[in-house]
Image (tube, rainbow, N blue to C red):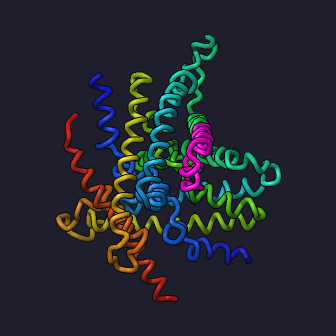
Amino acid sequence: MEDLFSTFLRAIFIDNMVFSYYLGMCSFFAISKNVKTSMGLGLTVVFILGCTVPINYLLEKYVLVEGALSWLDERFVNTDLSFLSLIIFITVIASFVQLAEMFIERFMPALYASLGIFLPLLAVNCAILGGSLFMQQRSFPNAGTATVYGLGCGIGWLLAIVGMAAISEKISYSDIPKPLKGLGIAFVITGLMGMGFMCFSGLKI
Amino acid sequence: MSNIKILLNGIIKENPIFVLLLGMCPTLGTTTSAINGLAMGAATTFVIICSNFSVSALKNLIPDQVRIPAYIVIIATFVTMLQLFMQAFIPALYASLGIFIPLIVVNCIVLGRAEAFAAKNKVIPSIFDGIGVGIGFTVALTLLGTIRELLGTGRLFNIKLLPEEYGSLIFVLAPGAFIALGYLIATVNKLKKAEA
């Protein structure tokens, strides 16, 4: 239980997707103009990460690693399919993005319209593939931990994008030097937020 | 448009980092030093050229409705090849680039070029487009890597230029990457204004 909690907190604050691994930048900068839309995108990311990380974990454990297929038949003890992992992971992610897209189009048409191209582009969002790849590196003990880790990563990303959107709303009337306007200042703000988040790295959990 | 023009277009007019602002994650994540930036640029260039070639060669065989998944599978295949190759022959570099090699699959530049250029053009121009965009990406990454390495550690391509105490570690860490790139983009904007 304690392990689950510390994995969760680590994924949100210390190993934050945006501020310590620079993942999911394209949609982060493009969508963080207003709080409501970024909240919608953030929640979608939480949902997709929370589903795909455990599914990919199970696929990795029971299909892909060396000898994983031995539950099927004795003959497969030496089969090693791990070279397929990238292709399998991205396929699972693309299907879930499709699912989320259909759901949002049906039930939240306003959000669907405001997200535009960035909703299908979640399939190629590195924060989501990154979640699965980190899961592969860290060899979690069970699917529960993987789920918690996926949710934590998603919530960390949500916090970052909502915070960024809130700041963007505030600075829209500020007097910014012309060349820095737009993306330049967005990068600098993200850097400053990142410095804030670095304080968490001293936490021992 | 001649092939040379296509090549230059990718490097200057449509530079993926400074103009199109695509592929930010590896740009920020791998440019802790000039060497890493250069290596990441070269790896991505290889994938762009191969995927542009395959997509434009196969474009008449791929049905329109499933083209995005088909492109992603093509790209993932080349990235897997690259990953195995690097693991076997340059393990040190592979270790320092880490998760960003498999993440080339989801680099928007690669998919963007497949969709915006290779799917509409013949094989030879597509290869030149891949080379051009790849070089543009590599130049941007190396530049950012150089700045961060120099400010962060006082070294350049591992050669000591400034005394150790002059380096401020923040530029090697994550926040420095954002700030350095922010001001780099501002500089490019300023130069473009002066030109026009």
Q: Quarter of the image containing the N terminus of chain A?
A: top left
The residue lying at 27 percent from left, 70 percent from top is B161
The residue lying at 57 percent from left, 24 percent from top is A63
Residue A194: quadrant of the picture: bottom left
The x, y position of residue A149, in whole percent, is 39, 33
Query: Does B63 lie within the magenta span?
Result: no
Relative to B168, is A19 on the left or the right? Answer: right
The x, y position of residue B149, in whole percent, is 32, 64
Q: Quarter of the image containing the C terminus of chain A?
A: top left
In terms of secondary structure, what is the magenta stretch mainly?
A: helix
Relative to A105, is B98 on the left or the right? Answer: left
Query: Does A121 lie within the magenta span?
Result: yes
The x, y position of residue B74, in whole percent, is 67, 47
The residue lying at 32 percent from left, 63 percent from top is A189
The residue lying at 58 percent from left, 54 percent from top is A113
Tell me how many marks there are: 0
| Residue A46, above or below B183 | above
Regarding residue A94, the answer to whether it shows in the image is: no
Regarding residue B114, the answer to whether it shows in the image is: yes
Outermost residue, top side: A74
Q: Nearer the viewer, residue B85 or B97?
A: B97
| Residue A72, above or below B23 | above
Relative to B56, is A120 on the left or the right? Answer: left
Outermost residue, right side: B60
| Residue B8, above or below A90 | below
Q: Nearer the viewer, residue B83 or B91?
A: B83
Q: Which residues are magenta?
A: A95-123
The x, y position of residue B106, in whole percent, is 55, 50
Relative to B30, is A120 on the left or the right? Answer: right
Q: Nearer the viewer, residue A11 or A75?
A: A11
Q: Nearer the viewer, residue A36 or A199?
A: A36
